[in-house]
Every structure is written in C-alpha cells, then in structure tokens.
Amino acid sequence: MRRGPARCGRIPVRGGRAGLAGLAAARDLAAGGADVLVVEARDRVGGRVEQTELPDGRLVQLGGEVVGRAHTAYLALAAELGLTPVPSYVAEPGALTRATPEGVSAGDPPHWFGPGDDTCHEKVTAAFCALARTVDPHDPWSHPDATALDHAPVGDWLRAQGATPAVVRLWEIGQLALADGSYERTSLLAALRKHAAVPGPDHYDYEAWEGLRVAEGSATVALRMAAALGGRIRTGAPVRAVTVRRPGRCSVRLAGGETLTAGAVVSALPVGPLRQVSVTGVSEERLASLHRQRHALAAKFVAAYERPFWQGLGRSGLSECEGVLGSTWPQSDGILSALVPPERLGVLLGMPAPLRTRELLADIARLYGDEAYRPLATHLRMWGTDPWTQGYVTQWTPGDVTAVGPRHGTHEPPFYVCGSDQWVAGYMEGAVRTGRDTAREVLRRG
Ligand SMILES: Cc1cc2nc3c(=O)[nH]c(=O)nc-3n(C[C@H](O)[C@H](O)[C@H](O)COP(=O)(O)OP(=O)(O)OC[C@H]3O[C@@H](n4cnc5c(N)ncnc54)[C@H](O)[C@@H]3O)c2cc1C
C-alpha cells in the first residue's frame, strides 16, 4: 500500500476502478505527474470490456465492442495506444433480418409494414431529428420544455405525432435491439439528448455510433493502458467507503479493512455498485443525483462458428428480434454477438441455467437456420446480475434526466466522478471522454 499527503506536483489520487474510465483517468494523471493508485474490485481490469480467446486464436468480446466515427475521444486514445480502427459489422454486406412471432423478413420494409407506414416513419423520424436540434446535449436542462420532454416516454410522443402501431413497433424493436430500455419507458429528453450528441439523418445513426471496432479487440484498449500503469493498479480490492475531508484530504476503505489516504478521489464506478459504497463528506445533492441514475439490465450472448453461414442466405448477421434476444450482429469472422434486453432478461433468469444456451441458439436458428445450433463455442455474460456492474449501460426512464439534474457529469473536488454513466448515453466513448476530462480537471486544480 502506498500512502502519503499531497506533495507539490505529485497529487496522490485514489480510486479510479479499472474500467476504461478509471484507466484513462489514471493514465493521464500519471502522465501529468500525479501519484495515482487504481483500486479495482475484480481480479481483472477492463470492467465492461472483457475478452477471451478461442482455441483457433480468434478473440471474443464479451462486453463493449463497437464504436463510431463520432467517438473521437475513444478513437484518439486507441491511436495513442497503437491500436487499429477497422470497419465494424455496419459495413457487412447482406440484409438486416427482423424476427417477430408472426414472421421473419430480410431488409426493408419490415414484414409488418402496410401502406403508408413508410411515409409515416419518415415523417416522425424527421420530427424527432428536428426536435433533437433544439436540445443542447451538454445542458438538456436549459430546454424551455425540459420537464415535459423528460416526463414523456418516447412511445407516447411517437403516438402523439401520429405514428401508426407498425411504426411504433419498428422504433421499439430497434430500441430493444440496443438493449438500453423500451421506448415505452425511455425519457424523450434523454433520447433527444443522445441524438443531439451525435446527430444523423436517422434517429440512431449506426455508422456514427457503431461503424468501427478496434482490430486488436476492444478489451485490448484496457489491457494496454493497464500494462503501462503496471504496479499502480491493485486488483481484488473492492472499495467499501470513501471519506472526503477538505481541503484535499480523503480516505478510501477497502473490503479487507485497509484504509488508503489521498489528496483526491476519482470514482469511476458504475452507478449501481456506487450505491453500495458509503460516501461521506460530499453534498447530499450530489449523492442524490448520483444515486438517482440507473442501468438497463442486460445480458450478452456470443456464439462462435466455423464460418459466417448467415452470409450464404444474403444476410449481414445484423438482426432485430422479438424473442428472448433483442438483436444479433457479426462481431468478427464467424462470431455472432447478441443482446438480451432488460424487458426480456427476466425470461432468461427464470430459465434453468442449463437450458439458456439452447434457447438462445433457437432464437438464432429462427433467424438464420439450423446451422445456428452447431457453434464451436458459446459465452453467456450476465452483466445485469454481475455484482460489479449491475447493469449494462445507463438507462434514462421518464423523469430521470431532470431528477439527476445538471450535476450529471460534474465534480465536487476533491471528489471527482467519471465513467460512461456520466456521459449522455453510456458507451465506451463516454468512459474514455469523462475519464480523460476528469484527469485534466484534477491536474488543473493541482
Ligand atoms: C454487453 C455489453 C455490450 C456493450 N457494447 C458496447 C459497444 O458495443 N460499444 C460501446 O461503446 N459500449 C458498449 N458497452 C458499454 C461500455 O462497455 C461501457 O459503457 C464502458 O466500458 C464502461 O466503462 P466504465 O469505465 O465507465 O465502467 P466499467 O467498465 O463498468 O468499470 C467500472 C469498474 O469499477 C469496478 N468496480 C465496481 N465496484 C467497485 C468497488 N466497489 N470497488 C472497486 N472497484 C469497483 C468494476 O469492477 C469495473 O472494473 C457495452 C456494455 C456491455 C456490458
């Protein structure tokens, strides 16, 4: 353990937590001359980015995977680490597949669309994009109708705009494919803010959000940062309590009872686990804001095959489904990723564990045929029930944006907060962006 009072030019900073945000913050703090120690509950680094290797050498991403050209902080970091962005599944040839109880279809329009639905979809998409242009992603609270927009579920807004049931269903199946919560339970202001942060012609621009991936594996971003930080990371060290004593005197108590002292603490925990850490010496308002944030609970399933057999059917591997799975997409050659959205996670949890893989493969077989039943390997990662994540990405239900308020993504020095939850909509970009911004702020304040 390293202890010590603040020294000029070398600020002891505790905390971090070795996800992308904590590692990015610690890397920049160390580069700026701070005496930094990252304390991590798990026995590995990476948090929600994690990878494993198949016997044939292919890497399998079990957590965060793709980024987009709008994710400038992440791409800049990847370049600094010598990693290579390559096109993601978005560039794959072939049609998108949609599966509902009454049918499976490839390409547009979806099989449940009838006359007029296409035009209606275009109309509400244009209205959504226009409304998003009135929202400042950095300050959605300043919108004159912030309260009303925040309390309106996207589904209600769509119907009020004249969206037909078929169009509402298209928006909903797309939203469940992303797994961050049904549009019937998503704040319109949060959805508009997300769009305003990365504008595009559609209500979710796949190229801007998901068009790239790191060729060496997205978890390699975390591993490279950790390798450079070396002994400045302590794994297997869950934080139980943080005490902030001004000016610049803080302590961090670990599960084993050990107490670390520091000039500043950077918390890079997901909002669920953070609720279980006792934080004192920070304003009630800040804690209320942090504790009001929530996560969509989801699971990720990955099936690795010898070959991308869906291509033979003219399919890209990207799908939106109304089964237990909400979506599939090709992760890399022959490897199919899939998400179970929060609305269906209970179905999966209610299933005896030995039946889950077969059930999820059945969803894939419905999309792409019986070859789906013959993977070389499968991985089911239950992020929603993982004690150190307790979720997947930030979920904004109606009323949450105003309840969390403008403290979102800000600090109360010497207590600093970063992590993907502190950006508009989770994502690895949010982790890297807020982590690096936080390091800058700590160093600026000395
Ligand atoms: C299945 C899945 C798919 C995803 N897909 C994408 C994607 O394709 N693209 C994308 O951009 N984003 C994706 N994301 C989201 C992205 O992975 C995360 O937003 C990002 O990695 C979070 O980084 P973070 O550092 O903020 O948090 P985390 O990675 O969660 O790091 C927090 C760290 O804190 C540790 N911790 C928790 N509690 C304690 C404690 N008490 N004491 C000490 N340490 C503690 C955790 O173990 C963890 O290491 C996905 C996430 C999941 C789960």
Image: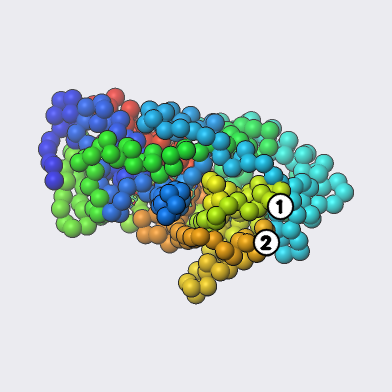
Residue 227 position (above or below residue 357): above
Q: Quadrant of the C terminus?
A: top left
Give the quarter of the image for residue 343: bottom right
* Amino acid, disc 1: Leu
Residue 313: give its label: 1
Give the quarter of the image for residue 42: bottom left
Q: Is residue 209 left or right of residue 380?
A: right
Q: Position of residue 331 (x, y in %)?
A: 54, 47
Q: Position of residue 337 (x, y in %)?
A: 54, 52
Judging by the rendered image, the residue that carries numbered circle 2 is 369
Q: Is residue 169 left or right of residue 415?
A: right
Foreground of the two, 134 or 310: 310
Mark 1 CB in 8 Å range of ligand 1? Answer: no
> Are circles 1 and 2 on residues that touch, CB within 8 Å?
yes
Q: Position of residue 97 (x, y in %)?
A: 70, 52
As helix, strand or loop, the secondary structure at mark 1 comes to helix
* Amino acid, disc 2: Gly
